[in-house]
Image: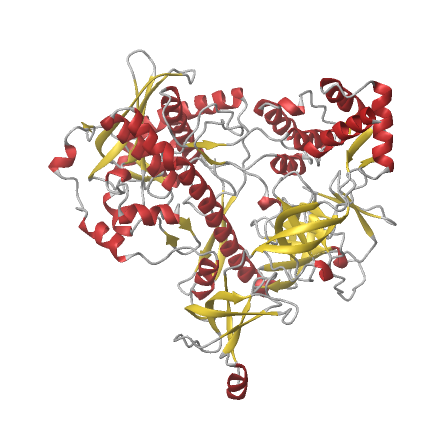
Amino acid sequence: MAQNERILAGVLEIFRHNPQKQFRVDQIEKMARRDRLGNFTELIKALSYLEHEKKIITDGKGQYQLAQENTIVEGEFRANDKGFGFVRLDDEDADDIFIQKDFTDYAVDGDRVEVKITAGGNPWNGKGPEGQVTKIIEHGLESLVGEFHPLTDEQVKTSHFIGYVLSSNKKLHNYRVYVSENGLIPQMGDMVKVSIKNYPDKDNPDSMTGAIINIIGNKNDPGVDIMSIVAAHDLRVEWPEDAMKQANEIPDHVTDEERKGRVDITDQPAVTIDGDDSKDFDDAVVLWKLPNGNYHLGVHIADVSHYVTENSPLNREAFARGNSTYLVDRVIPMLPFRLSNGICSLNEGVDRLALSCDMEITPEGKRVGYKIYPSVMRSHGRMTYNKVNKTLAGEMDGLEDKYVKLRPMLQEMAELHKVLYKQRHARGAIDFEEPEAKIIVDDQGKPIDIALHQRGTAEKMIESFMLMANETVAEDYYRKHVPFLYRVHETPDGERIKSFFEFCSAFGLNIKADPNNVKPIDLQKVVTKTEGTPEEAVVQTMMLRSLKQAHYAEQDLGHFGLAAQYYTHFTSPIRRYSDLMVHRMIHAYADQGMGEDVQKHFASYLPDVADQTSTQERVSIDTEREVDDLKMTEYMKDKVGQHFDAVVSSVTSFGMFIQLPNTVEGIIHISNLTDDFYSFDEKSLTLTGRGTHKQYKIGMPIKVTLINANVEQHQLDFEVYDPNAPKHKHNDRGISNKQRGNRGFNNNHGHRGGRNFHNSRGHNRNGRSRSGRR
């Protein structure tokens, strides 16, 4: 009996150690043999008993998984405006737990909660687990932004509140947040920020209380809409007095003292190449051919760390901000403009302090030598992508003399880029090209156009040079065995890749690769195979969802998407704290040596820097996207009733997301697919009509009609346009309990929430920031 109990306990422990994993019998047998848990017959008996006792579940074909009923787990509550919600567990590969409206325990979106699983999920029929919130561990919502509604004088007397605030956030819109008078007296229609004091409970399920901490302005005033989003994301816009004092005391020119110990490279014809409207220039490049036929590539980066010193007020503020945030009509900078547009910016014709990375590269793209050193440089030309692209195309009419004079160097740069790109491609770097959109607004902040931009050779070659510099710096300090900050993109999870390969096989793509040991080139081959095919969009979307997010770390974990063994961020210290930190360490190791004290010093706080920079990057991305969504919705609001060409960008159980040629996205809710009853296939990501067998899938061209533009919720609703179809009244059946959004989504939109990893340079200052950053 004791032996049987030992076998049962041992087998159950295998499942408990991997609660989300599905095991085949042969896998369990292998682990059981390792742990000496008995022979095959005893193992089968144990599995049969555990299944009978509902400790494990099976697909009936030899696969088993731990049953989840009555287990207690923790996670983050994600609310739905209909009242129900989902709990996302810390294990990102675990299924979200569905929570019915009556079992949320009044949790608010973002709360950390304890959940009892009441019905386990079944991975073989697509049914997710259900649960009941048993405790709110920590409230995630500390403040919100919304519109102020005053109470009547009579109501004020009886309630002691002056009014209530309603958030435009869909997930919080059902709550009234009552506020007391605390010296800030807003007017009706003002957008305000509220600090939450009391949360919903049994007696007040639909309300909270709080205090107004900021009056942003009237909702109809220009710019208040964007600043409301900025405030909701807690972005810092005011500068502390001590930080501004420090910034104002910094000289606006390079002094003789500062030149000491630096290499003077002011005679080199280095240039900056950026977007038309860029004002902060933190990278310059120069190129020439060496006598041995190799290229000399110089990448010269603004030496921000010289001015923003450790433990200074400016450094504390830059660390808190993490990076600059680029919105449609403004920048919320990491550093004051006196630095970012002045002494730290590599402006044309003036001397600037720099950290330089000179590289010698063969005609085949192999780096055979490099040097990293402090310098004094001078930009010989503020150039733009558009004009460099014209120069490379030989369209010289109307271009300034500097483009004519430096054209041979620019042509050699383009040659080197092609070689570097080819080399990156050969090693397996995954590259997606998406059109970038720039939202044009008038002086009142009203969107008047959305301009599309395709990256040309100029943009791509600057990216190639920045990637090469980032890799060079990362490898150099990795080989020195000192604490350093890396930009990492980890190898994707084997289960996710296995699912992706199974998805691809439905399109006849036979992928010969091990999902548990996948290499970047395996995925790059898939991209290459599908280029120009109808499957391209859906395969790329699903691939992105199977990848992890890039982030910062104090360990070198490699960069999967770039197929790079070593990678850091070195090239944008004006707008990324990570790069500023890298510069600081380069200086310290050069000036103070690599002794134990210096290493201990950086090792002590590098994890905090990695965590803060990764977190603030997400905050900036989310803010930028929300502002883009707002302005795109605003741009479309007077186009209700118009017809558009579109492409299906994502498919879910509750409808499909579509994208217009100008990158505007919206949803066709399943309740607006009125010509048939459509069922969702999660494996192939398709909606299929039961009667007509009509099918909708990612990448499919489609004609649509805009039927609603909700600017407040940043949501666009479309329907399929069929000029021959009878007119139907629109209904709103809502989203049923089982129709859950895929976690690849971000806010209201489809594929843009994917796990992208692009853009070495940080933000693309030629328009909208690209959907991810390398």
Along the viewing direction, whichever of 353 and 566 lies nearer the viewer: 566
Left or right of residue 582: residue 88:
right
- Name which quarter of the figure residue 299 lies in: top left
**In percent of the image, x 46 and y 49: which residue is there?**
620
Instruction: Give percent across and percent down for residue 488.
Output: 48, 32
Q: Is residue 465 above or below residue 627?
A: above
Q: Nearer the viewer, residue 36 or 237?
A: 36
Count up the numbered dots: 0
Percent across and percent down for residue 158 are 54, 85
Residue at the image position 32 percent from the left and 45 percent from the top: 280
Residue 550 visible within the image: yes
Q: Position of residue 8 (x, y in %)?
A: 79, 29
Residue 134, by quadrant, is bottom right
Residue 254, quarter of the rendered image = top left
Apparent side of residue 264 relative to residue 700 in the rendered image (left or right): left
Q: Residue furthest left?
A: 256
Decide: is 583 above or below 288: below
Q: Is residue 609 left or right of residue 741?
A: left
The location of residue 709, given as percent across then percent down, is 61, 63
Q: In the depicted view, which residue is nearer to us: 44 or 502?
A: 44
Residue 647 to residue 165: above or below: above
Q: What residue is drawn where x is 22% and y is 30%?
A: 375
Residue located at (36% from left, 37% from top): 579
In screen coordinates, is 559 left or right of 405?
A: right
Front in this rendered view, residue 558 or 397: 558
In the picture as drawn, the residue positioned furthest to the top comes out as 292
Specify how the rendered protein is coloured: secondary structure
- Quadrant holding the N terminus: top right
Q: Is residue 279 visible?
A: no
Residue at the farthest front position: 2
